Image: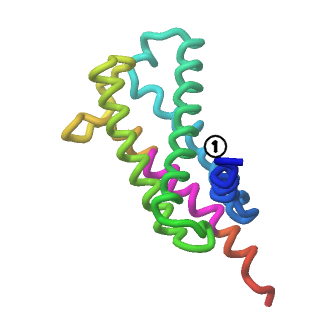
């Protein structure tokens, strides 16, 4: 049947090894906890903290948290594609670095787009800004600190699981 070989090849490419699945799930779990905490803590750095109702603030935080999860997932997948297969056993640090850089790049673009073009939100005066686009320091640090720490935890567990018992 024409095209069947191609479908089988796509399935082979998308197949994820049990170690990769385990590390990715641990990573995304750490991302979920870290980003939820960060989103809650940085709320006072946005004007909605003072102008919106509690229900809307909760919705906005949840919306941003889901977005953070999507960003982290896509950045990890793209980083694995860019750095080559074999993750997490090979090129773990390179993959983590590329993933964090992709997240930072997306954050700079998204913050600029949503604050200056779409005007979806505005920073409070307390939000430090990073030139040249006026990106908020808190969301930028979030997309550096949370994934960096989230990559450390599953890697440590993966290495310990593979280490010989002495």
Residue at image x 58%, y 32%?
Answer: 66
Out of 132 and 48, give the one closest to the viewer. Answer: 132
Q: Which residue is mark 1?
A: 33
* Residue 153 painted magenta: yes
Assign the magenta stretch its main secondary structure.
Answer: helix
Q: Secondary structure at mark 1?
A: helix
From the top left corner, tell me how far across and down residue 140 is, in percent: 38, 43
From the top left corner, tell me how far across and down residue 148 is, in percent: 50, 57
Can residue 29 be seen in the rendering of this structure? no
Judged from this view, the residue extending furthest toward the left is: 132
Residue at image x 77%, y 86%?
Answer: 164
Can residue 31 be seen in the rendering of this structure? yes
From the top left corner, tell me how far across and down residue 77 is, in percent: 55, 52
From the top left corner, tell me how far across and down residue 26 is, in percent: 69, 55
Q: Quadrant of residue 21?
A: bottom right
Question: How many discs appear?
Answer: 1
Q: Which residues are magenta?
A: 143-155
Q: Quadrant of residue 50?
A: top left
| Quarter placement of the C terminus | bottom right
Out of 4 and 99, give the one closest to the viewer. Answer: 4
* Residue 27 painted magenta: no
Residue at image x 39%, y 41%?
Answer: 106
Image side of residue 75 versus residue 33, left or right = left
The 10 Å Cα crowd at callout 1, few under 14, some 14 to 19, many 20 or more, is few
- Please say if 65 is above or below 120: below
């Amino acid at each position: 049947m024409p095209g069947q070989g191609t479908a089988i090849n796509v399935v082979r490419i998308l197949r994820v090894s049990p170690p990769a699945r385990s590390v990715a799930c641990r990573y995304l779990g750490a991302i979920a906890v870290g980003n939820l905490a960060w989103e809650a803590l940085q709320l006072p750095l946005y004007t909605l903290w003072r102008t919106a109702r509690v229900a809307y603030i909760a919705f906005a935080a949840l919306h941003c948290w889901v977005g953070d999860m999507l960003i982290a997932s896509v950045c990890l997948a793209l980083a694995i594609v860019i750095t080559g297969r074999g993750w997490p056993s090979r090129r773990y640090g390179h993959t983590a670095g590329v993933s964090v850089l992709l997240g930072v790049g997306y954050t700079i673009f998204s913050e600029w787009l949503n604050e200056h073009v779409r005007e979806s939100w505005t920073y409070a005066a307390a939000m430090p800004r990073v030139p040249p686009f006026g990106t908020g320091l808190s969301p930028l640090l979030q997309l550096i600190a949370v994934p960096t720490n989230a990559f450390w935890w599953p890697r440590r567990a993966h290495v310990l699981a593979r280490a010989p018992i002495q």
